Image (tube, helix red, strand yellow):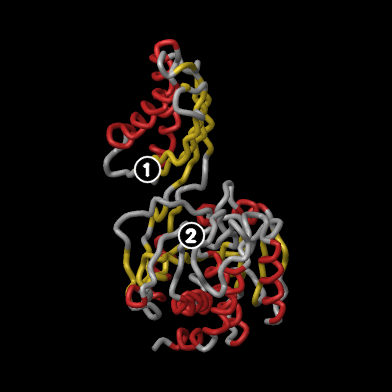
Amino acid sequence: MNKILRKALSIKNYIIRIRRELHKHPELAFEEKWTHNFISDELKSLGLKPIKINKTGIIVDIGKGNNKIGLRADMDALPINEENELPFKSINNGVMHACGHDTHIAMLLGCAKLLTLNPVERPVRLLFQPSEERTPGGAKGMIEEGVLEGVSEIFGIHIDPEIEIGSLSIRSGVMMAAPDEMDIKITGTGGHAAEPHKTNDVIYATSLFINEIQGLVSRKSEPTKPVVISICSIHGGSTYNIIPINVRLKGTVRTIDKESWQNIPQWIDDILKGISLSYGIEYELLYKRGYPILKNDEKKTKKLTCIAQGIFKNVEIMDDPVMGGEDFAYYLEKIPGSFAFIGGANKKKGIYSKLHTPHFIIDEDALPMGAALLYALANEKADN
């Protein structure tokens, strides 16, 4: 067994205790006050000096000097009501750690404990970042407040409840998509359902729009450059015999190349203009840019991959990017680094779920592996 993994396993109970306390007390973006205090207290108990940053975020330096390695964990939870029956089930109604940020904090605090027990030569900066789930994201504010000063490389990991425990997935280059948001209001003239010809039917116009935008994926985008467009919210009408005056739609657009990222807002507007001309409706389109495309640095990805091979049974080089988004991308726009997924599923134990669901669950045996990886990265000498 890898020596560093053995060290991490020796504090497994500590890491799991931390994770369960955090899971029990989830908080939404920039509301992570309990989480902030809990992390600060843990760091102080290790003899470290946490610094508050970006409202509820924290940084802490271990060792002095520049050329630091940065290690980041996100802190916020999701507006989901947990349906798991666990001893450490969320006590905050309608809020849940359904994306594993509780595990990310626990692994980084585990790394902090390992660093205090087994100091490394290189200075390390730990970043506990708020608001990954809500655009514009917490990473931007962290950067604006100077968290990358003196940091030459940065790494992050994300638990994945669909990947088997003992596995790590990564790729060089484009790793994750740019997730943009659209909010559309379609307005017409309502009326009686028996007389649709006397209305400008917004329900029908909406259905046309939903069908047409999928044509952008199959007919306007290059087949080798994936685009995912999802309408996730539709509100219009109140009863069965009245054609409403307006409909409101919300959704996301996810791209992995700059050309598609630039073109799609105009393509969506063109579709709405065409429907407006044909059916007499009016529309308002609010298109909100999300996080950038997440691009892993080739050299840093190779470094992480080599280290991971000593800790994980299976290190997979992904063929394709993930179409989800991550504000870790902002850090990678400023300095080189890499981001990876680690497995949290265990089918033999019946542990398997999906991110952003009320049944999110992971095998906690994965947590010492993540802590070991973070510590091993810090223990590696800086690149020349």
Please report whichever mark, 2 or 1, sits nearer to the chain's N-terminal start.
1
Crowding at label 1, few (<14), some or many (≥20) Cα neighbours within 10 Å?
A: some
- Does residue 305 appear in the picture of this structure? no
In the image, residue 18 lies at what x, y percent? 59, 76
Q: Residue at x 44, y 59 (%)?
A: 355
Q: Residue at x 45, y 23 (%)?
A: 241
Of residue 67 and residue 236, the one placed in the foreground of this image is 236
In the image, residue 317 lies at what x, y percent? 32, 64
Crowding at label 2, few (<14), some or many (≥20) Cα neighbours within 10 Å?
A: many
In the image, residue 84 lies at what x, y percent? 49, 66
Instruction: Return the residue at label 1.
Output: 228
The amino acid sitting under disc 1 is Val
Of residue 207 and residue 135, the one placed in the foreground of this image is 207
The circle drawn on residue 53 is: none
In the image, residue 83 lies at what x, y percent? 50, 62
* Residue 376 drawn above or below residue 220: below
Judged by depth in the image, the label closer to the viewer, 2 or 1, is 2
Q: Secondary structure at mark 2?
A: loop
Instruction: Return the residue at label 2.
Output: 358
The amino acid sitting under disc 2 is Pro
